[in-house]
Amino acid sequence: MLGKLLDSAAEKRDAILDGNTNAVRLVDGAGDGVPGFALESYASKWMAMTPGGEIAGDVKDWLKAGGKSVYWKRLDKHQKESPVHLYGAEAVPPQDAVETDCGGTPQPQSFLIRENGLAFEVSFQSGYSQGIFLDQRLNRAEVMRRMAGGGKLLNLFSYTGGFSVAGATGGGETTTLDLSAVYLEWAKRNFRHNAMDDAAHYFCKGDAFHWLKRFAKQGRKFDGIVIDPPTFSRDEKGKVFLVERDFGELAELAGKVLAKGGWMLCCTNFRGIPEKDFMRMIAMPNMEPAAMPEDFPEEPYLKSVWVG
Ligand SMILES: C[S@@+](CC[C@H](N)C(=O)[O-])C[C@H]1O[C@@H](n2cnc3c(N)ncnc32)[C@H](O)[C@@H]1O
């Protein structure tokens, strides 16, 4: 019975997995009739996720029978640990790590996935997340479309630069901003994996608030701004960011560096803010909420609002 549910969940994703995209959420908990269990496939390497300590025996049997390389991540206090290897081959034998199809060199223990024709570096050994959030697939595609006429894109809280790569592929000049030098380097590699020169784009290390004030003073303007912060963070100086407290100020600061006729994408995955409250925090004219991708049927936790 459970095996059938899992088979049918995975089959439903066949339409997404084509020659251009090989990373998808295969099972999304209660949305696929399997509460407490999620599974993502990254170039046929599987990442299972559970909120707590165990995977049910019949789910384990199904995972094993799939014959893939399977890893398991617990979404509780162990979330920051690297996932555990369960079945199949290790995701990346070290000798394969330097082979890419488009010129870049992923880090050891990393491999490339494809999404809408773009390559992104993924690692199952990098702690709390793999290098790309699959729930942002539709938004990355839309950013690519919106930058098709050129223009300047500012990607705040960039992580590994997924939105920047999409915007640059579209035709934009991108500014990628994050607190973490490690993630900015990863973002530069993602540019190179797509045969783009990262030196033709800008990368800023530091706090988003600090940089937005600086850009405003310099009179810099951007045609598109992506704001997709974490729920909580603390910078090197101990300054705390809390999405439910600080998003309004962030949107207001971003508004000051938005070019006339420009657009913003505001996102939060914080389950504690309903969409209408999030829109009230953004408080700008012409707001349009966007739905999550169809491979995430369980709960629309990711709120995405296009402004402008
Ligand atoms: C959840 S990820 C953002 C996901 C990302 N927008 C994407 O598309 O994949 C959070 C990122 O925000 C960065 N970050 C946290 N606090 C920050 C701050 N105050 N200023 C700039 N970046 C910050 C972290 O280093 C991390 O890379």
Image (spheres, rainbow, N blue to C red):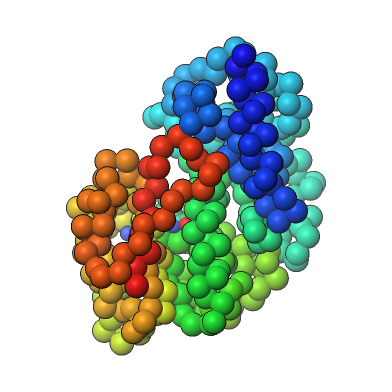
For the C terminus, give its image quadrant: bottom left
The residue at the far bottom in this view is 219
Residue at the spot 41% in from the left edge and 37% down from the top edge = 299
* 201, 173: nearer the viewer: 173
How many numbered markers are drawn? 0
Residue 91 falls left or right of residue 170? right
Residue 202 falls left or right of residue 88? left
Can see residue 293? yes
Residue at the spot 27% in from the left edge and 41% down from the top edge = 272
Position of 168 relative to 244 (above/below): below
For the N terminus, give its image quadrant: top right
Can see residue 161? no
Residue 257 on image: x %, y %: 31, 79
Quadrant location, ligand no. 1: bottom left
Position of 30 relative to 165 (above/below): above
Residue 83 falls left or right of residue 215? right
Residue 270 on image: x %, y %: 33, 44
Residue 289 on image: x %, y %: 36, 57
* 176, 249: nearer the viewer: 249
Residue 298 falls left or right of residue 68? left
Residue 7, image quadrant: top right
Position of 2 relative to 168 (above/below): above
Residue at the spot 45% in from the left edge and 61% down from the top edge = 158
Residue 278 on image: x %, y %: 26, 53
Position of 21 relative to 171 (above/below): above
Residue at the spot 79% in from the left edge and 55% down from the top edge = 99
